[in-house]
């Protein structure tokens, strides 16, 4: 089941869900707004054709850049961003990253396929930001770019994979 505002606030008050930093007005009817932090990862260098196989590593063909000024995201371009907030979830709550409709209506997607936030994480969320419009979009640091929808799990699990404690791109 999806958690509503009153349940989200109760889980935060009990210390089971932690969002740092967070202002009270970030919690909506059934989600928590998240901000784009001040760094991005863009495609840069590498071979002209990227092999998609078990050894593929995005770090070999991308570079991290500071996001001080707005980044102009061109049509068809995808970059990585990261949330300013660190999300800590208990083993019985997972989440879904979703874009905000005000930006989706302009052609901005905030995740390509990796929208699931595993139970038991304690990290900042990487965003796969894509421009599917016909015009360039200027992406600003500090914008409430997305939201996390929390969902109670049947049972309990803790994600301990490669990105379990990511703090940087």
Image: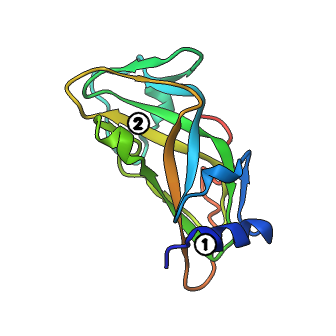
Q: State which quadrant residue 14 falls in.
A: bottom right
Q: On the rendered structure, is 115 left or right of 86?
A: left
Q: Which mark is residue 93?
A: 1
- Picture quadrant where residue 169 is located: top right
The structure residue drawn at horizontal position 61% and vertical position 57%, both measured from the top left corner, is 27
Label 2 sits on a secondary structure element that is strand
Where is residue 42 shown, x and y percent of the image? 45, 24
State whether residue 73 appears in this view: yes
Q: Residue at x 74, y 65 (%)?
A: 12
- Residue 43 shown left or right of residue 39 in the figure: left
Q: Compared with residue 94, is residue 127 higher up or lower down, i.e. above or below? A: above
In the displayed orientation, state which residue is furthest to the right.
14
> Residue 138, how many percent across, how many down?
40, 21
- Distance of label 1 from label 2 (alpha carbons): 25 Å
**On screen, residue 160 above or below 19:** below
Q: Measuring 65% from the left and 61% from the top, which residue is drawn there?
A: 160
Q: Nearer the viewer, residue 124 or 55?
A: 124
Q: Nearer the viewer, residue 147 or 112?
A: 147
Q: Write down the residue under mark 2.
A: 129
Q: Earlier in the sequence, mark 1 or mark 2?
A: 1
Task: State the residue in front, 136 or 115.
Answer: 136
């Amino acid at each position: 089941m999806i958690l509503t505002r009153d349940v989200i606030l109760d889980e935060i008050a009990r210390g089971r869900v932690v969002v740092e930093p967070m202002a009270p007005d970030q919690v909506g009817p059934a989600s928590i707004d998240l901000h784009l932090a001040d760094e991005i990862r863009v495609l840069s260098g590498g071979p002209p054709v990227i092999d998609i196989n078990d050894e593929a590593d995005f770090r070999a063909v991308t570079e991290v850049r500071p996001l001080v000024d707005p980044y102009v995201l061109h049509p068809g371009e995808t970059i990585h961003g990261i949330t300013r907030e660190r999300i800590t979830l208990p083993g019985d709550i997972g989440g879904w990253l979703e874009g905000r409709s005000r930006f989706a209506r302009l052609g901005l997607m905030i995740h390509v396929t990796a929208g699931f936030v595993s139970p038991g994480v304690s990290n900042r969320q990487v965003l796969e930001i894509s421009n599917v419009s016909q015009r360039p979009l200027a992406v600003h640091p500090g914008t409430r770019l997305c939201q996390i929808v929390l969902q109670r799990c049947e049972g309990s699990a803790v994600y301990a994979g490669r990105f379990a404690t990511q703090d940087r791109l």
